[in-house]
Image (spheres, grey):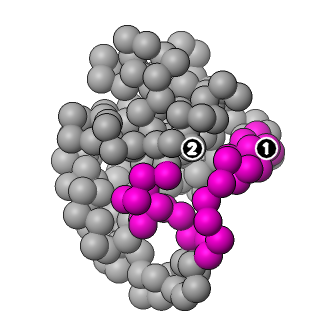
Amino acid sequence: MAVLEFPNPALTDGTVTLRPWRAADVPQRFAAFSDPLCLRYSWPHPEPFTAQHLRDRAAADEQARLSGDRLAFAVADPHDLGTVLGGAALYDVDLEQLRARIGYWLGADSRGRGAATGTVRLLATWSFHDLGLARLELTCEPTNSASWRVAERCGFAFEGVLRSHQRFRHGRRDTAVFGLLPGELR
């Protein structure tokens, strides 16, 4: 078990800054994630999304960080670190096998300006260089064309669709899987 530490200094590319979540972020995080598109693709539970889910998630994220399983980031405006654009995570981290998954979401007002691509590139660069990972995966719902474009822009190769891969709301859904190896990041 290896504790995952946040990068210091924070990861930034001038478009986004990836920093730890703060308690003060809850109202912005709730408002941004409550967007219908975020809920459509990223909220797997049958019950409605609430601010309590965020508080519970913060506690779970800290436990996952301490156990080396996940590192969750606020995607912030680099010119105003208090402004949350969305969230990102390096999750299912397996340091023995040198692999992990990257996930992200953006609020409606933050889409279409390179924030998702910048987030994925920052996390991938840091994961390969600083953590020494040998493989990253990005997954999404197969009809999420915006996430497909982000994956392809960053150099991820489409590897297939896992049928009925995960529980989602009152049923199951498929998952598109993309893989990235060191040297493939664009």
Q: Position of residue 109 (x, y in %)?
A: 31, 38
Magenta residue span: 34-63
Q: Magenta includes 45?
A: yes
Task: Specify whether 161 is left or right of 136.
Answer: left
Amino acid type, residue under disc 2 in the picture: Phe
Indicate the quadrant where residue 2 lies. Answer: top right
Residue position for label 2: 30
- In terms of sequence position, does the residue under pointer 2 or pointer 1 come before the other? 2
Q: Magenta includes 71?
A: no
Secondary structure under the numbered disc 1 in the rendered image: helix
> Total of numbered circles in the picture?
2
CA gap, disc 2 and disc 1: 16 Å
What residue is at 39 percent from the left and 21 percent from the top? 77
Tell me the mark number nearer the camera, choosing from 2 and 1. 2
* Mark 1 Cα shell of 10 Å, populated few (<14), some (14-19), many (≥20): few
Whether residue 169 is situated above or below residue 137 in the rendered picture: below
Please name whichever residue, 169 or 91, is drawn nearer the observer in this view of the structure. 169
Q: Position of residue 104 (x, y in %)?
A: 44, 48
